[in-house]
């Protein structure tokens, strides 16, 4: 195929040749032959077409906020002309160094070209990097532009930046609700460490019956009393994660939802790394439940799902979520960690749910420990303008009575402002303040 420029040159050649022949003018004939030679040489020259991919370097995993380098090595064998390379960048990535669009000149010789640029990952998720697109043009655009692509589509998983909670492990006097290092599991092999005396239940070992305490009972029809001993293994931790639309206050990248997911992953890693059994229930979206397990496999399993989580339309499902997890809570007596926002208009459901958690063990002295990690939305509106600042103040005032009410119930409340300090520093500050 020929371009419009080639057609014009051929028309010009024909016009000069016919004019020279009709007028018998040798100069016009020579000029027409000169234009013909010029056209033939340019049509003989081919634009670069054979572009091969030698190597592609792209990580399969990256952390939020991490800068990654993308490198392609290409081999251009034949042809001469202008070559343009381009790769589409997925959303939520910002260019840091280099460019994803390169234009260069290809000479006669075969050339190896390195295509490099750096990106910053700004939001978790799974992204696809499409093949590199190329475009070649003829030396004088006498031939049509050639298009193509090299390489294959590659996947990149952008994971949360793991928050550092390791240093709070060595802090003395840490409350059991935050770091239950000495709290033991309810289910496991019994030890010789005495815990309490309680009423006998069907299935309890006969050897554990406390006959002396039973003999003191005034009512002979009562069940006998039995000794309860501590069991081996550390306590179970159960995480309730709020994934409602109300958690998306802020920008697309910096919002309460993203920070709450980071907090959930950090708490998950912190307890699993110390041998705890950790389970999770994500409410207000697809109601995802993760059975309590231990080890690295549990961390990888939950983290993969956290990357894919999208906010749901429902916003008042926390009490219902507790009812769905009732059998696990009563069976394991876990430390319950609730990650949510207390300055939203749906936060009263969180208070109802925490009250329900605290009442699950009835009149038992050992109430169910509950910790609420509050990721307030008003901290993400600071400095955004006069109206947003006023809204931020109102949201903060609205959340104070709820925080006080939760603390009166016996729950620990952690107010985490991601703009000012890390989660570990917030937990340490809360413990020292208590």
Image: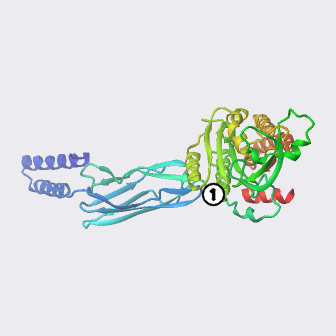
Between residue 377 and residue 2, name the one nearer to us. Answer: 377
Please tell me whether residue 340 is drawn above or below residue 430 in the rendered image. above
Is 12 on the left-hand or right-hand side of 426?
left
Is 428 on the left-hand or right-hand side of 129?
right
Quarter occupied by the N terminus: top left
Q: Residue at x 14, y 47 (%)?
A: 14
**Residue 353: x, y in percent?**
76, 36
Between residue 394 and residue 336, name the one nearer to us. Answer: 336
Residue that numbered label 1 is attached to: 162
Q: Residue at x 31, y 54 (%)?
A: 136
Q: Residue at x 35, y 54 (%)?
A: 151
**Residue 201: x, y in percent?**
76, 38
Q: Residue at x 15, y 46 (%)?
A: 15
Between residue 237 and residue 102, name the one nearer to us. Answer: 237
**Residue 418: x, y in percent?**
72, 53
Question: Can residue 1 be seen at all in this image of the molecule?
Answer: yes
Is 27 on the left-hand or right-hand side of 92?
left
**Residue 424: x, y in percent?**
73, 59
The secondary element bearing badge 1 is classed as: loop
């Amino acid at each position: 195929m020929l371009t419009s420029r080639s057609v014009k040159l051929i028309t010009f050649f024909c016009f000069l040749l016919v004019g020279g022949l009709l007028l018998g003018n040798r100069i016009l004939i020579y000029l027409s032959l000169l234009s013909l030679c010029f056209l033939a040489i340019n049509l003989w020259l081919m634009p670069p077409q054979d572009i091969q991919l030698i190597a592609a370097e792209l990580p399969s995993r990256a952390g939020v906020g991490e800068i990654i380098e993308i490198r392609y090595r290409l081999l251009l064998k034949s042809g001469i002309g202008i070559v343009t390379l381009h790769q589409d960048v997925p959303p939520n990535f910002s260019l840091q160094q280099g460019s994803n669009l390169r234009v260069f000149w290809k000479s006669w010789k075969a050339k190896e070209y390195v295509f490099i640029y750096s990106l910053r990952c700004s939001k978790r998720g799974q992204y696809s990097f499409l093949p590199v697109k190329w475009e070649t043009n003829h030396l004088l655009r006498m031939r049509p532009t050639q298009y193509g692509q090299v390489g294959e589509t590659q996947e990149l998983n952008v994971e949360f930046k793991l928050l550092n909670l390791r240093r709070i492990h060595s802090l003395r006097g840490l409350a059991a609700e935050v770091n239950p290092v000495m709290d033991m599991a309810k289910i496991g092999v019994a030890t010789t460490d005495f815990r309490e005396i309680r009423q006998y239940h069907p299935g309890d070992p006969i050897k554990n019956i406390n006959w002396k305490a039973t003999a003191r009972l005034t009512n002979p029809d009562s069940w006998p009393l039995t000794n309860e001993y501590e069991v081996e293994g550390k306590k179970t931790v159960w995480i309730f994660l709020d994934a409602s639309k109300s958690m998306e206050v802020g920008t697309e990248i910096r919002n309460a939802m993203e920070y709450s997911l980071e907090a959930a992953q950090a708490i998950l890693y912190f307890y699993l790394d110390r041998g705890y059994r950790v389970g999770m229930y994500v409410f207000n979206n697809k109601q995802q439940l993760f059975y309590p397990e231990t080890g690295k496999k549990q961390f990888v399993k939950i983290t993969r799902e956290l990357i894919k989580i999208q906010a749901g339309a429902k916003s008042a499902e926390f009490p219902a979520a507790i009812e769905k997890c009732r059998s696990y809570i009563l069976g394991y007596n876990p430390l319950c960690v609730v990650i949510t926002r207390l300055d939203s208009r749906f936060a009263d459901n969180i208070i109802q749910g925490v009250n329900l958690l605290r009442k699950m063990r009835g009149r038992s002295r050992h109430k169910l420990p509950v910790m609420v990690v509050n990721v307030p939305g008003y901290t993400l509106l600071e400095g955004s303008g006069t109206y947003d600042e006023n809204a931020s103040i109102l949201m903060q005032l609205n959340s104070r009575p709820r925080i006080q009410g939760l603390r009166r119930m016996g729950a620990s409340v952690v107010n985490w402002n991601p703009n000012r300090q890390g989660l570990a520093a917030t937990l340490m500050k809360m413990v020292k303040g208590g």
